[in-house]
Structures are given as C-alpha cells and as structure tokens.
Amino acid sequence: MSNVLSLAPLFRHSVGFDRFNDLFESALRNDAGSSYPPYNVEKHGDDQYRIVIAAAGLQEDDLEIEVERGVLTVKGGRRENSAESVTFLHQGIAQRAFKLSFRLADHIEVKGADLKHGLLSIELVRVIPEEAKPKRIAIAGQRPALDN
C-alpha cells in the first residue's frame, strides 16, 4: 500500500500546469519539509496564471527570478547590511535563503513580477503560436451518387 497522496483528480481540468501533478507527488515523496516559503499557484482565466510566493521581510534586491529551458526559478535571501545593527529579542519571520523551481507547460511565458505587501506575484500567460492552434480543414468534393 502506497502512502503517496495522488493529486491527479485536482488536475483533470487544469490548463497550463498539467505536469505539476508529477512535481507535487515527487515533492511529497522526496522532501516533505521543503515548504518554505509558502506559495500559491492560481489560475485567472483560460490562459492566465499567477504564482504568489510569501516573501516576508525581503526586498526586490533580495530576489532573483529567471526562466531557462521551461523552468522558472525563484531565488531569495536576505542580503546582509553591515550599516544596520539589529539584535533580535524574538525572530519569528524566517529570513533564510530559498530556491523554488516550477516547470512551465508548453507556451507558458512569464509576463512580469511584482513585490507588494510581502507577496511576490509572478504573472504567467499562455501564448499559443499560430502553427500550434487548431485548424479547421474544409472537406472538398462530394461522393458520387450511386446509379440504380
């Protein structure tokens, strides 16, 4: 008996993140404690998606976003500022470095990113090229009539 949770029913109607089912299942199998920082994957229409990552305490300079060969990678970590000397009496906001990777589906492109109120939002859009769109094929000619 397998103790792996199958997320396949959740992805039956998804468009754009069809391969995330495998990624989530492998993440559950390999490293159950790698949920830092928390994030959401949202669908906003048929061709628009958003990844929202909790980046509390981080600024734009502390984050790096890149796409290479269909993999979106987000790296973050607080840069040390020697001019600022702080002694924490209690530090509840995690500021450790992280690296998140997302495999993007075919024709998904990063439209932009925004950091607001401690949330990093990465906008994604599906751009289907003309050659990949469905084409209607006209049926030429008719069948000859049968002679009696």
Image (tube, grey):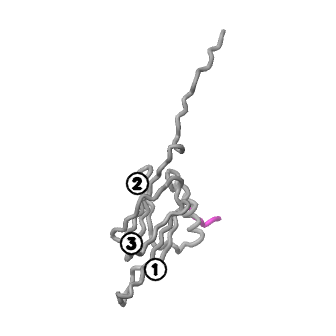
140 vs 111: above or below: above
Q: Nearer the viewer, mark 1 or mark 3?
A: 3
User: Does 31 appear in magenta?
Assistant: no
> Dot 1 corresponds to which residue?
96
Residue 19 image position (x, y, % from top left): 56, 57
57 vs 88: above or below: above
Residue 10 image position (x, y, % from top left): 51, 56
Q: Secondary structure at mark 2?
A: loop
User: Does 2 appear in magenta?
Assistant: yes
Q: Badges 3 and 2: C-beta atoms under 8 Å apart?
A: no
> Dot 2 corresponds to which residue?
44
Quadrant of image for the C terminus: top right
- Residue 7: quadrant of the picture: bottom right
Q: Secondary structure at mark 1?
A: loop
Q: Amino acid at mark 2?
A: His
Q: Label 3 to label 2, Cα distance in Å? A: 24 Å
Q: Secondary structure at mark 3?
A: helix
Specify the principal SS of the magenta part.
loop
* Residue at 41% in and 61% down: 112
Q: Is residue 21 left or right of residue 121?
A: right
> Dot 3 corresponds to which residue?
60
Which residue of the protein is positioned furthest toward the left in this rendering?
Answer: 117
Marked residue nearer the N-terminal end (1 or 3): 3
